Image: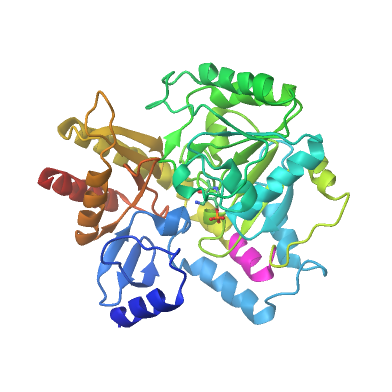
């Protein structure tokens, strides 16, 4: 029973592992964009296991690929040749622009960003990193040091050489949507807080945990130029924004018309399988090959078979197109809701990566943190599981599986309307 599970979890699992909701939901089954609890009650999943179930829960194509590979071979590591990892590397890099043609598979977003930073440091011979305030790149020692959110930092030494630039946040930032203006801060940082040379600039192309915050227009082109002039490489964290989720592009960085030197991916890449990757240029990849490097599970044949099926499902199910259509429609509906509810300060994001910034007052933009938590609970009662984030926990995050449809969007917007009217 649910009570037994709750007891086992409380007794035998680390108390650091927390759950959403005062009365936690128990999920035992998933299908497409729906989740089911132990009583058979259906929930609309607007958060996709923290933006991970990209093509839908238990997608038949992904299931079949995993099952077939599982029967043949589960694991050997990369010390022998295997067709799955080789084919997958080709199929994944085929979807990348420019010279981004070499993949390294790992198991999580933190690992991918760790490896990207290592590659950048080896390749450039420099050490310093520039990241953004309000960013999230993982919880390993290196990535926690890059963290731009105190809520996720532990009081341990980390982050040597990491500089946090002003966040080019069009809603809360000082310079509105003027990307090049924020970019000047990166140049100031490089000139004042480093030796003038950096290893890398790393940013999400839409901040995820930070609350679906897009980068101000023209930010990345200006920053990439400055960083390269200072001897650094550019890292795009596509852990949340990749694989068509933004609708307007397959990769989030394409929305800013740049091509990074290193791209990290996780979450949606495997639809829930532990799979992640770093994709870079042959030149940067070679810098890592001067010494030994190994990842035991990275490129595991079962995960690679699943990853290949995810790529196919994104194409065949037209996930990117659907993200653009349904996400665009839902954003419009949410903007209409904003006209009737003063507590909605900002509706933002692209495709099926949307954020609703909840404020006590539209002028001061004071975060409506308690109200956000309350509405999230109410939405659960109404049958919708949504995410929340932002520095002060006042931003709803809508990032469902990409099979989310128009009726799902209407259902979510109506439920939100109901919950806000009750406030
Ligand atoms: N990068 C981004 C943008 C993320 O959102 C996350 C996870 N929330 C990570 C990296 C870290 O991924 P993982 O939890 O798989 O280590």
Residue 2 sits in quarter: bottom left
Q: Residue at x 21, y 35 (%)?
A: 343
Horizontal side of residue 78 vs 359, given as left or right: right
Segment tinted magenta in the rendering? 299-308
Q: Is residue 48 above or below residue 13?
A: above
Q: Is residue 416 above or below residue 23?
A: above
Front residue of 259 and 209: 209
Q: Residue at x 43, y 65 (%)?
A: 57
Furthest toward the left, the residue is: 422
Number of callouts: 0
Q: Is residue 305 magenta?
A: yes
Q: Residue at x 45, y 33 (%)?
A: 214
Image coordinates for residue 253, horizontal then vertical, percent: 57, 35
Horizontal side of residue 167 vs 121, given as left or right: left
Front residue of 175 and 405: 175
Image coordinates for residue 15, horizontal then vertical, percent: 43, 67
Horizontal side of residue 226 vs 86, given as left or right: left
What colouring style does the render use? rainbow
What's the magenta bit mostly, secondary-structure-wise? helix
């Amino acid at each position: 029973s649910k009570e037994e599970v709750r007891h086992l979890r409380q007794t035998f699992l680390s108390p650091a592992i927390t759950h959403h909701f005062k009365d936690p939901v128990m999920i035992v089954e998933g299908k497409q964009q729906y989740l089911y609890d132990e009583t058979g009650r259906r929930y609309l999943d607007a958060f996709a296991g923290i933006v991970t179930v990209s093509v839908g829960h238990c997608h038949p194509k992904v299931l079949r690929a995993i099952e077939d590979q599982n029967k043949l071979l589960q694991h050997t590591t990369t010390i022998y040749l295997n067709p799955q990892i080789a084919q997958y590397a080709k199929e994944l890099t085929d979807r990348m622009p420019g010279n981004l043609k070499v993949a390294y598979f790992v198991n999580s977003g933190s690992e991918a960003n760790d490896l990207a930073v290592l590659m950048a440091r080896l390749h450039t011979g420099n050490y310093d990193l520039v990241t953004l305030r309000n960013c999230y790149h993982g919880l390993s020692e290196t990535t926690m040091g890059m963290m731009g959110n105190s809520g996720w930092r532990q009081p341990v030494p980390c982050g040597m050489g990491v500089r946090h630039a002003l966040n080019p946040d069009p809603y809360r930032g000082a310079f509105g949507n003027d990307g090049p203006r924020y970019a000047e801060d990166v140049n100031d940082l490089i000139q004042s807080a480093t030796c003038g040379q950096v290893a890398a600039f790393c940013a999400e192309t839409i901040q995820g945990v930070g609350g679906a915050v897009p980068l101000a227009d023209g930010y990345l082109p200006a920053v990439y130029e400055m960083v390269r002039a200072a001897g650094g490489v550019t890292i795009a964290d596509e852990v949340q924004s990749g694989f068509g989720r933004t609708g307007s592009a397959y990769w989030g960085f394409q929305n800013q018309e740049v091509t990074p030197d290193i791209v990290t991916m996780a979450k949606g890449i495997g639809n829930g399988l532990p799979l992640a990757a770093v994709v870079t240029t042959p030149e940067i990849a070679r810098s890592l090959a001067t010494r030994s490097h190994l990842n035991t599970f990275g490129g595991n044949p079962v995960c690679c078979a699943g990853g290949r099926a995810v790529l196919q499902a994104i194409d065949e199910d037209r996930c990117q197109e659907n993200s653009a259509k349904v996400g665009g429609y839902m954003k419009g509906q949410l903007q209409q809701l904003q006209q009737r509810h003063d507590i909605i300060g900002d509706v933002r994001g692209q495709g099926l990566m949307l954020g609703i910034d909840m404020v006590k007052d539209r002028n001061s933009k004071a975060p409506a943190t308690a109200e956000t938590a309350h509405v999230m609970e109410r939405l659960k009662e109404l049958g919708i599981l949504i995410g929340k984030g932002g520095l002060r926990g006042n931003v709803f995050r809508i990032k469902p599986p990409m099979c989310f449809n128009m009726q799902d969007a209407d259902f979510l917007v109506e439920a939100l309307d109901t919950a806000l009217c009750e406030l």
